[in-house]
Image: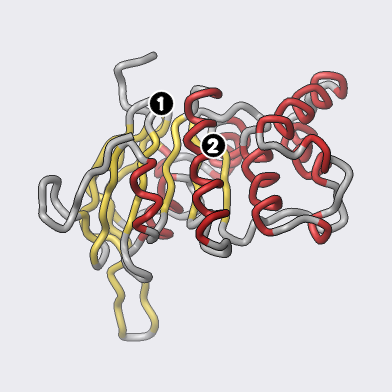
Amino acid sequence: MSDEPLVIAEGLRKVYRTGPKEVVALRDVSFTVNPGELVAVRGRSGSGKTTLLNQIGGLDRPDAGRVVVAGETVSELPEAGLLRLRRDVIGFVFQSFGLIPVLSAAENVGVPMRLTRTPSGEREDRITMLLAMVGLEKHANQRPYELSGGQQQRVAVARALANRPRLVIADEPTGQLDSQTARQIMQLLRAVVRSEGVTALVATHDPALLTLADRVLELHDGALVPAGSPAQAVPGA
């Protein structure tokens, strides 16, 4: 495993403007994430968690600062480079699941591999393995509306892993789930980091889930709470 951080954020600043009004979403945010870590980002609604993850994943650009993922300066990549990064290096899990309603669970997992033109035999083997990993091998042919919320999110996790990403970004992946199911999904992400050798950056406001992270970053009004502050307890793995 490389000693170099997989994710580097330096001096990130993001300001949203509505007419004369300015909202500072990120204030000089800097941190690193090492390969194989599960890092949780916590903070109240409006603290900047989603904005931060969007910068890391190349879904938005900072007004100042830079983001480096797997040695590439995300904040400077052209659109084609960002598309390649999001296809090959980063997997996303969203709060709203984001599954395609007309496709089965297996077909949803296979979408990223179709985009990379993975040979059909290899694609089917990978789909079978991923659905087994998330405990849904018996639900491969069911469509999203036939699955529970927790099952849909498991499909979303499997889909995020389809192209063997180095980084998984999950934005409030348990926000629409009950507490027991939420913990199961977070435990799944924990297991995936270990078994697939990926790195994960997970936004959550649920204190009960933070104990499953290797490290916790806390945002308050767009700024990171300094390490060691009483407001930021760092749970063990």
Distance between the alpha carbons at the discs numbered 1 and 2: 14 Å
In the image, residue 40 sits, relative to residue 194, either above or below, namely below
Name the quadrant of the C terminus.
Answer: top left
Position in image of residue 55 (x %, y %): 41, 50
In the image, residue 185 sits, relative to residue 45, either above or below, namely above
Q: Residue furthest left?
A: 229
The amino acid type found where label 1 is placed reads Gly
How is the model colour-coded?
secondary structure
In the rendered image, which quarter is residue 222 located in?
Answer: bottom left
In the image, residue 149 sits, relative to residue 135, either above or below, namely below
| Left or right for 93, reference 128 | left
Q: Residue furthest bottom?
A: 20
Look at the numbered disc 2 and give the secondary structure of its residue: strand
Mark sitting on residue 188:
none
Q: Report the residue marked by disc 1.
A: 36
In the rendered image, which quarter is residue 14 located in?
Answer: bottom left
Q: Report the residue marked by disc 2.
A: 90
Look at the numbered disc 1 and give the secondary structure of its residue: loop
Position in image of residue 1 (x %, y %): 39, 14
Residue drawn at x 75%, y 32% as measured from the top left: 113
Number of residues whose C-alpha sits closer than 10 Å to that of mark 2, classed few (under 14), some (14–19) or many (20 or more): many
In the rendered image, which quarter is residue 146 located in?
Answer: bottom right
Residue drawn at x 56%, y 59% as measured from the top left: 95
Residue in the foreground of this view, choosing between 21 and 107: 107
| Left or right for 172, reference 12 | right
Q: Residue furthest front?
A: 180
Residue drawn at x 42%, y 42% as measured from the top left: 201
Residue drawn at x 72%, y 58% as measured from the top left: 148
